[in-house]
Image (cartoon, rainbow, N blue to C red):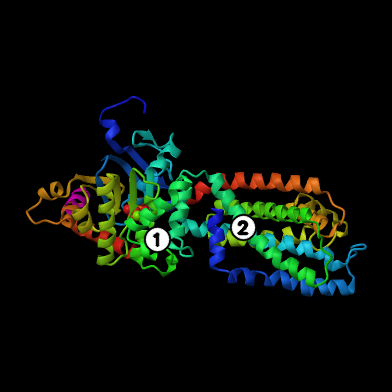
Amino acid sequence: MNGESGPAERQAITCRGLRHAFGDKVAVDGVDLDVAEGEIFGLLGPNGAGKTTTIRLITTLLPAQPGMVEVFGLDVASHRMAVRRTIGYLPQQLSADAALTGRENVELFARLFDVPRRQRRERVEEVLAAVGLADAAERRAQTYSGGMIRRLELAQALVSAPRLLILDEPTIGLDPVARDGVWERIQEVRRATGMTVLVTTHYMDEADQHCGRIALMHRGRVQALGTPSELKSGLEPGATLEEVFRAYTGDRLDEPGDGFRDARRTRRTAGRLG
Amino acid sequence: MCIVELQKMRHDRTELYTRAIQPALWLLIFGETFSRIRAIPTGKVPYLDYLAPGILAQSALFIAIFYGIQIIWERDAGVLAKLLVTPTPRAALVTGKAFAAGVRSLAQAVAILVLSAILGVALTVNPLRWLGVIVVVMLGTAFFSCLSMTIAGLAMSRDRLMGIGQAITMPLFFGSNALYPVGLMPGWLQAISHVNPLSYEVDALRNLLIGTPGHLLLDFGVLVVAAIAGITAASALLGRLVR
Ligand SMILES: Nc1ncnc2c1ncn2[C@@H]1O[C@H](COP(=O)(O)OP(=O)(O)O)[C@@H](O)[C@H]1O
Ligand SMILES: [Mg+2]
């Protein structure tokens, strides 16, 4: 658009020195990220790592005090509206409106994104079918199971045909079958449209299986970055991402030798809170 | 935004019915009693006729003043974050909510006016005046619901919003001409009444519905300005809720 060409334009998200504090609690502490167009990028870390805060910085909900975020080359601070137009967002909480039917939930977002009236019906049908809810579309969302609600929210995020899909813990609290169902839909849609997906999760196995590249986040920082196999290759064969994570966070801890136990304790606390 | 609220109302009508009970009690008990004892001088107008527009405005106030709770709830449920990541301007979101609150008020207004007519209140039959009533109820509700959303943006929590809402509802109601003429009030209460948009709402409704003399143009002016100010304040604070 601005005549600039080169790698910057193939970058879906660029973050530099991203930092955010709530009072004196530093949630995100100097994060650099590069998400290429078309990839599934996983932001992985325990509860409290700063994943949601990072996402809220990227989605224009929080102002990045120090630091810079660009989405498709647009600076988030100065091009908020343009950035919002490119994003489909699924928050961490179950946020579909239980009082409305599945279709009404999706129609609302078609309207909020200014999908032209003539295309609206068709788009809504399309995304409802894409997430496998065409048959349940007339039922109110309060009758849906957790997995169905998550898929409905996926439809809401997809109805504007976003270039960037941002999913905050899309499978949190779901049983394994429902988790697979959600991931299957995400993969299908991405194959069909080539959109970029940024997804957070604290399920290591999921990230391993579905993400092209992963950033391991801990205490507001990116501790390691790479494809799942790159991350695992540093350890002995057969290592899981779980072990990789422990190895990396262990490295960072102050008291040598005590690192693993501390990392485990953090995870236990996080688990209780989550 | 508004369409959604209408869809929700269509799905759940019980709320509308239960909400109509309180104003009905006001009209029946307070209205009938004070009509009998003639404690409040309202000139040639029967007290019940005088009261009906006041109760109409009151019910709209009660619906609107806690509307911010819905915003807080939407914040907690992640809905607000999702809305704010769409390219729809904040002012449009707030206006939609305010409009929806207005429609809820109108649904209740119908119930109150039907009851009033049954009780023998002489209501206007002029369709233009009815149109005016609709606009006045919508504007008044829009202002008070925006006030509530503004408070929500400042208070940030449901409990604090409830507290503030409860603290200001009664002064707004009693510090207005809804129950009695301003002339009966002590000076300080008159002063409150003069800066209270509810008084202008009641004045307009009374004028339109039962033909008492009023200041229609001034009333409309005050309500429009108040609604715009409310929308502006609420949209400026909406983003704060998701920080
Ligand atoms: N609105 C907020 N106010 C205060 N602290 C917050 C707020 N949101 C998040 N935090 C804190 O910031 C840290 C990171 O949180 P978050 O980004 O939600 O982590 P994650 O999504 O990885 O679980 C946590 O310690 C959390 O308690
Ligand atoms: Mg989170």
**Which quarter of the rendering shows the C terminus of chain A?**
bottom left
The residue drawn where x is 48% and y is 63% is A100
Q: Nearer the viewer, residue A83 or A143?
A: A143
Q: What's the mark number on residue B23?
A: none
The stretch of residues the image draws in magenta is A246-254
Magenta stretch: helix, strand or loop mostly: helix
- Which of the two marks, 2 or 1, is nearer to us in this view? 2
Tell me the element at label 1.
loop
- The residue type indicated by label 2 comes to Ala
From the viewer's perspective, tell me whether residue A176 is left or right of residue B205.
Answer: left
Q: Share a chain, discs 2 and 1? A: no
Residue receiving disc 2: B101
Instruction: Report whether B84 appears left or right of B222.
Output: left
Label 1 crowd (10 A; few <14 / some 14-19 / many >=20)? some
Give me the chain letter of mark 2: B
**Amino acid type at mark 1:** Leu
Mark 2–mark 1 distance (CA, rounded to whole Å): 25 Å
Instruction: Let me know if residue A160 is in the magenta part.
Output: no
Q: Which residue is mark 1?
A: A94
